[in-house]
Image (cartoon, rainbow, N blue to C red):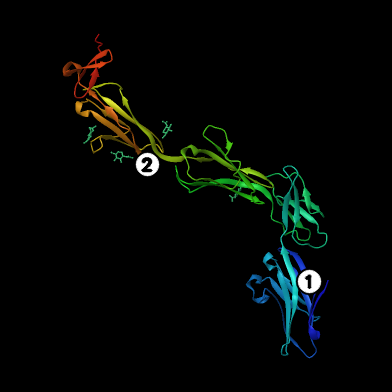
């Protein structure tokens, strides 16, 4: 369909067509001829697009050739077409006379389109469509490739089959077999990454990201979690995004995670990611052994315990009203105890994440009964009388019932 752009006084440009749709990567010829008034002599002709002379446009470097033949045919050849070459191309010629200049405007509209595979349909009955957004040559023949190997050739752009998640499918048009569409395939190499990287500390903000190689792009992600030894549960039915965010992560969030990425072609799950949330010591407490009374000259061992991740790496023992620490290590033994050892003891548990002091335990040292009965006291408790004795160090109830 030749297309004439007519000016006054005999100026004109005739393009062979007004618009062209071409496949990305292919080659196109834009051809025109011109007329001009008598008395002029043409001294310069060229094609331009986007205002710039094509010869000077770096985007076209090495891809354009312009050829004029004696028969008034002016051909612009563009090879290795890119989508960015889509533009209106105009032909201009200049003569030796003042004002002797004519542009064939509007020019030829070139649309460069890649082939694309569209996926429609459900789980078992998917259909692939090989398409571009503009009309190619009349009745093209479509060729389908599975994992790069030709599997089908048909004049219909549709392809229905059982498509497995793991295979990739692309299409081409006969005559341009080297210009495949990008392949479509189910998600691959699905993985979970943790940000920030490194140690995960309780209370911090942590983001898990599910990433996948997929075409069409991943549509939705499903997050799964289980505590050690438990069963996997979906984290949330709402969240189908690529990220799962913990605003303030808790130690109870420790466990195994994975994500499942889905696109129109299938699903793929990541490997399991183990998350260990670190926290400073808590529930720090002291146990005393032996329990019960501690007699002068005997020994007692205090043991500090604490819940911490990583485990406590430093224990320090303090006695109240004594400024310097008494000892270090998880257990603290006081041997050959004397009355001055009486007092309140507590421990400090520390790991890289913090420290916590236990509450104090009272250590009471009993004098030896034989030598230390010094004071007696009667207590009345309703009609129940007890005789007590005490030393400075120890308050001991003999428990005699006096009728
Ligand atoms: C994806 O996995 C394949 C093997 O299955 C591997 O060759 C490729 O390098 C991986 N790609 C990425 C981006 O990890
Ligand atoms: C530790 O302390 C928390 C409160 O701080 C409490 O909920 C939890 O039950 C304690 N755990 C143990 C093992 O004592
Ligand atoms: C520690 O000292 C304070 C005042 O100096 C005193 O009131 C308190 O009884 C003392 N505690 C112990 C366990 O000795
Ligand atoms: C634990 O007690 C020691 C000694 O009194 C003190 O220096 C330290 O700051 C305390 N630690 C905490 C976490 O309260």
Determine the CA span between mark 1 and mark 2.
75 Å
Say which label, 1 or 2, has the lower sequence index: 1
Q: Is residue 399 above or below residue 118?
A: above
Name the one closer to the observer, 292 or 212: 292
Q: Residue at x 77, y 69 (%)?
A: 19
The quarter of the displayed image where residue 48 is located? bottom right
Determine whether the beta carbon of the residue marked 2 sits less than 8 angstroms from the nearest atom of ligand 4. Answer: yes
- Res 233 → quadrant: top right
**Quick check: marks 1 and 2 in contact, CB under 8 Å?**
no
> In the image, is residue 201 above or below residue 181?
above
Q: Secondary structure at mark 1?
A: loop
Point out residue 357 in the picture as x, y percentages from the top left corner.
33, 36
Percent x, y of residue 322:
23, 36
Residue 142 in sight here: yes
Residue 181 picture location, percent across and down: 71, 56
Q: Nearer the viewer, residue 292 or 331?
A: 292
The residue indicated by pointer 2 is: 354
Rendered-image quadrant of the N terminus: bottom right
Q: Is residue 117 left or right of residue 222?
A: right
Query: Few, some or many C-alpha atoms within 10 Å of disc 1 (few <14, some 14-19, many ≥20)?
Result: some
Which quarter of the picture shows residue 10?
bottom right
What residue appears at the point 76 percent right and 62 percent down from the top-left corner? 134
Q: Quadrant of the C terminus?
A: top left
Horizontal and vertical percent position of residue 316 = 30, 36
Q: Is mark 1 within 8 Å of ligand 1?
A: no
Image point (42%, 40%), residue name: 279
Vertical comparison of 48 with 136: above or below: below
- Badge 2 marks a residue whose secondary structure is strand
Q: Pointer 1: what residue?
A: 18
- Figure label count: 2
Q: Which mark is residue 91?
A: none
């Amino acid at each position: 369909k030749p297309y004439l752009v007519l000016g006054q006084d005999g100026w004109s440009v005739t393009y062979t067509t007004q618009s062209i749709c071409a496949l990305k990567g292919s080659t196109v010829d834009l051809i025109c001829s011109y007329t001009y008034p008598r008395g002029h002599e043409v001294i310069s002709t060229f094609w331009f697009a986007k205002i710039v002379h094509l010869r000077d446009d770096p985007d076209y470097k090495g891809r354009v050739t312009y050829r004029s033949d004696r028969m008034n045919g002016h051909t612009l050849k563009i090879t290795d077409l890119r989508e960015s070459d889509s533009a209106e191309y105009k032909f201009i010629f200049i003569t030796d006379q003042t004002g002797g200049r004519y542009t064939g405007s509007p020019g030829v509209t070139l649309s460069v389109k890649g082939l694309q595979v569209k996926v429609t349909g459900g789980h078992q009955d998917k259909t692939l469509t090989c398409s571009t957004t503009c009309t190619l040559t009349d009745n093209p023949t479509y060729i389908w490739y599975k994992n790069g190997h030709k599997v089908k050739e048909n004049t219909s752009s549709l392809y229905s089959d059982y498509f497995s998640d793991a295979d990739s499918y692309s299409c081409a048009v006969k005559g341009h077999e080297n210009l495949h569409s990008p392949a479509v395939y189910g998600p691959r190499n699905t993985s979970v990454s943790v940000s920030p990287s490194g140690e995960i500390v309780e209370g911090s903000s942590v983001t898990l990201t599910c990433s996948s190689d997929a075409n069409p792009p991943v549509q939705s992600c499903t997050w799964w979690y289980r505590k050690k030894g438990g069963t996997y549960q979906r984290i949330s039915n709402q969240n189908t995004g690529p990220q799962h965010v913990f605003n303030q992560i808790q130690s109870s969030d420790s466990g195994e995670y994975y994500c499942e990425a889905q696109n129109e072609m299938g699903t793929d799950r990541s490997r399991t990611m183990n998350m260990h949330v670190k926290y400073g010591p808590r529930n720090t407490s002291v146990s005393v052994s032996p329990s019960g009374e501690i007699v002068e000259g005997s020994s007692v061992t205090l043991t500090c315990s604490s819940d911490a991740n990583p485990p406590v790496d430093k224990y320090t023992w303090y006695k109240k009203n004594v400024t310097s620490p008494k000892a270090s290590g998880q257990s603290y033994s006081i041997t050959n105890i004397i009355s001055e050892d009486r007092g309140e003891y507590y421990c400090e548990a520390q790991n890289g994440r913090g420290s916590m002091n236990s509450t104090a335990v009272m250590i009471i040292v009993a004098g030896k009964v034989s030598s230390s009965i010094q004071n007696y006291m009667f207590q009345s408790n309703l009609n129940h009388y007890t005789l007590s004795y005490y030393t400075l160090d120890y308050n001991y109830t003999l428990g005699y019932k006096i009728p």
